[in-house]
Image (spheres, rainbow, N blue to C red):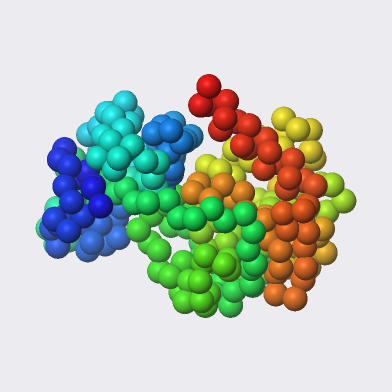
């Protein structure tokens, strides 16, 4: 696997970072995952806006422009026979030795990983997790290296390929999936947890909400309980890599899966938007 690290293209087996990197010592780092279509990263500006907001909050300076990073992605694609891929942009605070600091991190470690896209998944099942969703360290959640809560949840699920885990918060409100945002449909209306629950404002979540509004499908954000989801007609999750994935079953509850009318409308609109980018 080819990667990019701090200005150079290297093989994955040759990657290394300092043990004094504050991303390693203190978990101070952030990442964004996205995929390409015909070599171009999808919703890249939106991913970078969130990344830069996270870095600004923690005073980490990113030494590359969006244009430069997109060129890196194109080069990684070329090194992989021009095939579309799964990308992760990872920025950690860099080597600053032992001890916390209050000044700006001027020399972060910047890595872009590329790997093969997983098989297409249109439908899967889900379970309610015993692990309670943690609250973010700041006012809104970023994609940070503080991932222990997700790992605890992942240990409850045999395979994320076939099964997603749904969190609730300490107050019992529906939150999000281990690697996804949650939506459900009742009587033709789409519902999704509010950012007030502390969930990640997923880039694909935002995109699908925009699609719903363009299709004039009512969409409501709020605080919901498990029973609100369990009474729904349809349920689906969104991720940057797998797009929109229908949920066929949640524990004992059966949904319409890929046959759901709202799911089909959103999926078709999503694919049309991607095709529009390719023209």
Q: Is residue 114 visible?
A: yes
Residue depicted at 39% across the width and 34% down the height:
39
Residue 55, given in percent of the width and then of the height, sits at 33, 42
Determine which quarter of the picture holds residue 4: top left
Residue 257, given in percent of the width and then of the height, sits at 73, 58
Q: Is residue 183 left or right of residue 156?
A: right
Residue depicted at 43% across the width and 33% down the height:
38
Q: Is residue 187 left or right of residue 46?
A: right
Residue depicted at 57% across the width and 25% down the height:
276
Residue 125, given in percent of the width and then of the height, sits at 65, 67
Towards the viewer: 172 or 164: 164
Q: Is residue 88 visible?
A: no
Determine which quarter of the picture holds residue 36: top left
Residue depicted at 22% across the width and 34% down the height:
63
Q: Is residue 224 left or right of residue 116?
A: right
Residue 268, given in percent of the width and then of the height, sits at 68, 38
Towards the viewer: 92 or 119: 119
Number of marks: 0
**Farthest residue in the front direction?**
81
**Farthest residue in the top direction?**
279
């Amino acid at each position: 696997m080819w990667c990019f690290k701090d200005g150079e293209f290297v093989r994955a087996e040759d990657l290394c970072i300092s043990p004094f990197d504050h991303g390693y010592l203190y978990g101070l780092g952030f990442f964004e995952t996205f995929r390409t279509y015909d070599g171009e990263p999808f919703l890249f500006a939106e991913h970078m806006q969130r990344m830069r907001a996270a870095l600004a909050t923690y005073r980490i300076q990113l030494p590359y422009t969006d244009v430069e990073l997109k060129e890196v992605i194109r080069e990684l694609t070329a090194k992989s026979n021009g095939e579309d891929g799964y990308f992760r942009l990872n920025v950690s605070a860099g080597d600053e030795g032992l001890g916390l600091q209050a000044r700006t991190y001027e020399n972060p470690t910047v890595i872009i990983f590329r790997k093969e896209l997983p098989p297409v998944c249109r439908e899967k099942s889900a379970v309610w997790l015993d692990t309670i969703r943690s609250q973010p360290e700041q006012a809104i959640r970023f994609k940070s290296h503080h991932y222990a809560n997700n790992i605890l949840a992942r240990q409850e699920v045999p395979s994320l390929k076939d099964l997603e885990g749904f969190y609730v918060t300490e107050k019992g409100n529906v939150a999000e999936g281990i690697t996804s945002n949650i939506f459900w449909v009742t009587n033709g209306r789409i519902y999704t947890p509010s950012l007030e629950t502390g969930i990640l404002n997923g880039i694909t979540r935002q995109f699908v909400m925009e699609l719903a509004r363009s299709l004039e499908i009512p969409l409501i954000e709020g605080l919901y309980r498990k029973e609100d989801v369990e009474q729904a007609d349809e349920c689906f999750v969104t991720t940057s890599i797998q797009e929109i994935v229908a949920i066929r079953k949640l524990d004992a509850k059966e949904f319409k899966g890929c046959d759901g009318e709202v799911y089909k409308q959103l999926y078709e609109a999503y694919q049309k938007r991607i095709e529009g980018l390719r023209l």
